[in-house]
């Protein structure tokens, strides 16, 4: 009489299954926990403002929050890719200013809106790729490169038009830009739809593509990623190119909102962009994050700014509030990461988990 043997592939042992389930549960909790705190904070602040400010929950105010933070969101999506790779782009706001001047000059020269937009986005892609080339191929520190190009791009924006703002309101190509930035599709602003599409595309790239998987691998451990066949240099080049692409798109929205291309960049905008990404749960050490959390981070900071305005609190307090929130979010993220590592370690070493079990003394 023969006895049928069951291979591990056919039916994994119950102990292994329970261990894998425990680790999967930890991973699920950590994914949710990345942005659970800021989401709860957003809900609490929104509830408080709904009670204290009659105009807060009106549709006009909600669309105003979205429109006024759309540029931040676009830049923050690009910054999310960079920070997941364990880098940072300090030049993103200056790159947006440089792209805005290119956009203004092309519109002033009589270019059609679609051609001017393509040229502007291509320019953003180009200068982002320059950052990526120096970081990935020349092996220069991302802090050195992006700090240097921060000044270079800002100077470029000042030089090309002698430091003057280019008014595009009366140009032939501004009509479609105005409709795009300020128009509506039914009750929904066009800009809100554009932001949603951008989030879906970026989220899909991170979650469902081989590039997204390679990006998380590089951010977690570039040497291990290289040994597993990932082209680390190509990934790094791509993420800074994406940040440049985002700067180009953001410049189009910025020019459309201001009806002019200004060579000056808001010095507080960079901190707001990075704060939104980190508050949304993207780890500054790389290898963890996503654009959903970034969107929540942008909304959180936008709602706080809107609440300060509605409450007649001086805008000078906004930087202090954002800075405190950023420090708190990063600090809590570090504590959460430490807790996750401890739980994973315990799960992998627990008896029946499939990991090392305590042996006899």
Image (cartoon, rainbow, N blue to C red):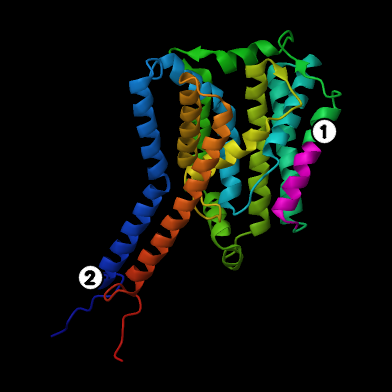
- Tag 1's secondary structure? helix
In the image, the segment drawn in magenta is: 140-153
Is 185 magenta? The answer is no
Residue 170 placement: quadrant = top right
- The residue tagged 2 is 14
- Residue 328 horizontal side relative to residue 24, left or right: right
Whether residue 246 can be seen here:
no
Is 146 magenta? The answer is yes
- Tag 2's secondary structure? helix
Sequence-earlier tag: 2 or 1: 2
- Residue 326 horizontal side relative to residue 337, left or right: right
Instruction: State the image coordinates of residue 175 (x, y, percent, origin top left).
Output: 65, 10
* Residue drawn at the location 73% of the way across and 14% of the way down: 168
Q: Is residue 73 above or below residue 61?
A: below
Whether residue 142 can be seen here:
yes
Local packing at callout 1 (Cα closer than 10 Å; few below 14, some 14-19, many 20+) is many
Q: Is residue 150 above or below residue 157?
A: below
The prevailing secondary structure element of the residues shown in magenta is helix
Q: Which mark is residue 156?
A: 1
Closer to the camera in the image, 160 or 175:
160
Q: Quadrant of the N terminus?
A: bottom left
Instruction: State the image coordinates of residue 163 (x, y, percent, origin top left).
Output: 83, 24
Q: Which mark is residue 195?
A: none
Residue 122 placement: quadrant = top right
Q: Is residue 151 above or below residue 162?
A: below
Disc 2 vs disc 1: which is toward the camera? 1
- Residue 99 horizontal side relative to residue 292, left or right: right
- Residue 166 horizontal side relative to residue 239, left or right: right
State yes or no: discs 2 and 1 in contact (Cβ < 8 Å): no
């Amino acid at each position: 009489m023969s006895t049928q043997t069951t291979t591990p592939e056919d039916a994994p042992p119950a102990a292994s299954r329970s261990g894998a389930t425990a680790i999967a549960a930890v991973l699920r909790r950590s994914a949710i926990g990345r942005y659970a705190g800021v989401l709860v904070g957003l809900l609490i602040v929104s509830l408080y403002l709904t009670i204290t400010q009659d105009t807060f929950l009106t549709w006009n105010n909600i669309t105003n929050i979205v429109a006024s933070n759309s540029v931040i969101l676009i830049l923050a999506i690009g910054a999310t890719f960079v920070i997941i790779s364990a880098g940072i782009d300090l030049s993103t706001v200056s790159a947006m200013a440089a792209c805005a001047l290119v956009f203004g000059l092309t519109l002033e020269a009589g270019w059609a809106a679609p051609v001017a937009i393509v040229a502007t986005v291509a320019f953003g892609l180009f200068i982002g790729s320059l950052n990526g080339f120096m970081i990935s191929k020349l092996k220069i520190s991302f802090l050195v490169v992006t700090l240097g190009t921060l000044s270079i791009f800002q100077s470029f924006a000042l030089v090309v038009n002698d430091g003057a703002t280019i008014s595009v309101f009366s140009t032939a190509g501004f009509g479609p830009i105005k409709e795009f930035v300020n128009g509506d599709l039914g009750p929904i602003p066009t800009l809100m739809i554009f932001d949603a599409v951008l989030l879906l595309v970026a989220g899909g790239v991170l979650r469902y593509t081989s590039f997204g998987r390679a990006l998380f691998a590089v951010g977690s451990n570039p040497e291990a990623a290289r040994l597993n066949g990932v082209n680390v240099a190509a990934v790094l080049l791509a993420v800074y190119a994406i940040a440049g692409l985002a700067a180009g798109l953001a410049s189009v929205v910025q020019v459309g909102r201001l009806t002019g291309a200004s060579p000056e960049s808001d010095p507080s905008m960079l901190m707001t962009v990075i704060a939104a990404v980190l508050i949304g749960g993207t780890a500054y050490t790389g290898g963890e994050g996503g654009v959903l959390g970034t969107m929540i981070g942008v909304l959180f900071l936008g709602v706080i700014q809107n609440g300060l305005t509605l409450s007649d609190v001086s805008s000078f307090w906004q930087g202090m509030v954002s800075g405190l929130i950023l420090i708190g979010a990063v600090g809590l993220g570090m504590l959460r990461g430490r807790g996750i590592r401890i739980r994973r370690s315990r799960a992998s070493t627990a008896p029946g988990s499939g990991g090392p079990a305590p042996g006899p003394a």
